[in-house]
Image (spheres, grey):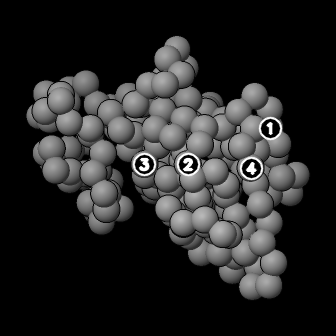
Amino acid sequence: AAQAALSLMNDSRGFMWFGTENGLYRFDGSRYVEYGIDSQGDKGFSGYQVNTIFEDSDGIIWAGTSGALNRLDQKTGRFSHFFPDSLRNGSGDNVIRFVTEDRKGFLWIISDMNIFRFNRISGTFTNLGPDSLIWHKKEKSFYTRDESERFLEDHEGNIWIGTDNGLYFFR
């Protein structure tokens, strides 16, 4: 990867993953496999700039870009694209900055504008931001760096997310 890496991940199979401004790369220790942009089809990820990479409990690789949440089928090399805001292409809701999974198997997504819970089975997003967003300043982007260190699932399954704009709590 000859570009600056914006996101890094080491998966359960030992591969290193790198996200750049216009590519997703898998490194096996000797070779790179490049996955490029293909916003209209399934041969690449949708959006640009791979901001975050996450492997879920089923070993599925998710790439959050400035445009979509992308699921990679490693067997076929094909992508599925998911959009928190399917009506507004350039929406800050579609700029995915952080992805993690809770113990129930839901993905938690932090975008530039909101917090979402994603159901991997139905492929649907639940916007969890409106009630909590009264706590943050509208003129600022919701996302702040190092969100991974600010996400916590407690022993009762409650979700806590701390940002520069406030503390968010979800049951």
Please tell me which residue is depicted at 27% across the width and 51% down the height of the picture. 144
Residue annotated with mark 3: 97
Q: Do we see residue 95 in this rendering?
A: yes
The front one of 128 and 20 is 20
Mark 4 vs 1, N-terminal side: 4
At which x and y percent is residue 100?
46, 55
- The label on residue 36 is 4
Q: Quadrant of residue 10?
A: bottom right
Q: Quadrant of residue 111?
A: top left
- The amino acid pointed to by label 1 is Asp
Q: Residue furthest top?
A: 87
At which x and y percent is residue 139?
18, 30
Q: How much space separates mark 4 and mark 3, taking CA atoms?
A: 19 Å
Q: Do we see residue 126 in this rendering?
A: no
In this rendering, position of residue 72 left or right of residue 102: right
- The label on residue 49 is 2
Mark 4 vs 3, N-terminal side: 4
- The amino acid pointed to by label 4 is Gly
Q: How much space separates mark 3 and mark 2, taking CA atoms?
A: 10 Å
Q: Regarding mark 1 in the picture, which secondary structure is present there?
A: loop
- The amino acid pointed to by label 2 is Gln
Residue annotated with mark 1: 42
The quarter of the rendered structure image containing the N terminus is bottom right
Q: How much space separates mark 2 and mark 1, taking CA atoms?
A: 17 Å
